[in-house]
Amino acid sequence: MQSGFAVMRRIKLPFAGLTIDFVDRESALKRVFEWAERGTYPVQVVFGPEGCGKTAWLRQSAELLKDMGFDVIYFNPVERDVLVELGLHDLKRDFLRLVEELSRQHMVANIAWSVIDFARRAVEHGSKRIAILVDDIFQDIGISKSATYVKGLLGLLEHPPREYERIVSVVATSEGISRREIGKHDWADLKPMWNMGRDSFEQLYNLLPDPKPDFEYIWRMTGGNPRYLEQLYKANWIIDKVVEKIVEGKNITPSFVAKWKRLLEKAVEDPDVLWEPDTPQELVDELIERNLIVYLLSKRDPWFWVDTPPPEKDLELGIGRYVAWQTPLHREAVRKVLEMYN
């Protein structure tokens, strides 16, 4: 088992204008190995901060699963990325042809649903091992349909058209509100992923050319999030530029800040303020919908997490026991607007 895992080919990934080998997520890849050994039931839904590395992990997982003899369908509508490795060449050709046609018609949501259809057809035509990896689709198909989509994947596990050996079914999302929709049912096993650990993040940081700020400073600003490391690099390490993009992208408006000023001032110091029973649910919902926080953090026992969990509490990084800012930069975006309209 371990020998096959150790020699797995590391995929190449674009990062900050470079082409790099996949870094880190050893625990998360071992989790995929375990799923491949026994199959997944129910569907595995992995959620975590935007840019924490879910996409890179899923692409590397596709490589691992191919090496273990799985037919693989991977789809990421955000990056218009489709990977199809099916032993049934006619089915692969038909799927890619459909993807091309639907892409021309800007019918991305239809591609997402066709993933389930073609996975079912693959089993029907004799595929014994198949992996379905779907990345960040809920915004395209609609958050209200997220649970229905997971139910469709579960249907393949429970009612296959033909006997199979193993199916691995994984959906990744950074849409916090979809977690709530899916959690209403028992169709999925929800597992969180956090930003990169310090040592692995430093490996990524070291790949970037000098001159650059001290690593400790970058760690405190990003909390180990690779996407925001890349954004800082592209912004010539000017924090204010990245913070301003978050303010605009997350629609952190003066009216929003003024409405919740007292609570937000406390939350930028300790996000667990948002966990207190007298905190209005409306504020929590708005912060989740804007992908500013992760609410209801799981116990830090690694069993509950796909990869290494965050610290129990680290207020410097904006991490509380029950609530955390997605990155320290997200917290700084809220703090900036608070200061502007104080």
Image (tube, helix red, strand yellow):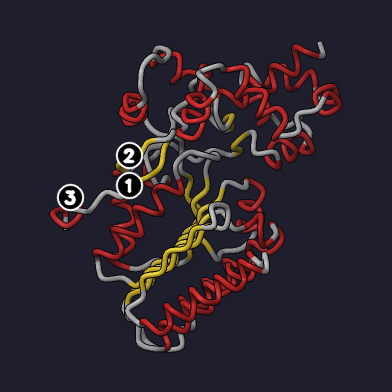
* 318 with respect to 204 (left or right): right
**What is the distance, in whole Å, between disc 3 and disc 2 at their CAs?**
18 Å
Q: Which disc number belongs to residue 269? A: none
Residue 110 in the image: state x and y as whole percent: 63, 71
Q: Residue at x 37, y 36 (%)?
A: 18
The answer to whether residue 273 is above or below residue 342 is below
Residue in the foreground of this view, choosing between 330 and 269: 330
Above or below, 140 against 246 in this view is below
Residue, disc 3: 6
Q: Callout 2: helix, strand or loop?
A: strand
In the rendered structure, which amino acid carries the disc numbered 1?
A: Lys
Q: Position of residue 159 (x, y in %)?
A: 49, 83
Q: Quadrant of the C terminus?
A: top right
The residue at which mark 2 appears reads as 20
- Which of label 1 and label 3 is nearer to you? 1
The single residue placed furthest to the left in the displayed view is 3
**Helix, strand or loop for disc 1:** strand
Q: In the drawing, does residue 194 fall left or right of residue 72?
A: right
Residue 323 sits in quarter: top right
Packing grade of label 3 (10 A; few <14, some 14-19, many >=20) is few
- Identify the residue at horizontal 52%, vertical 48% (top origin): 47
Residue 333, horizontal then vertical, whole percent: 66, 22
N-term mark: 1 or 2: 1
Whether tag 3 and tag 2 are in contact, CB under 8 A, the answer is: no
Q: Which residue is mark 1?
A: 12
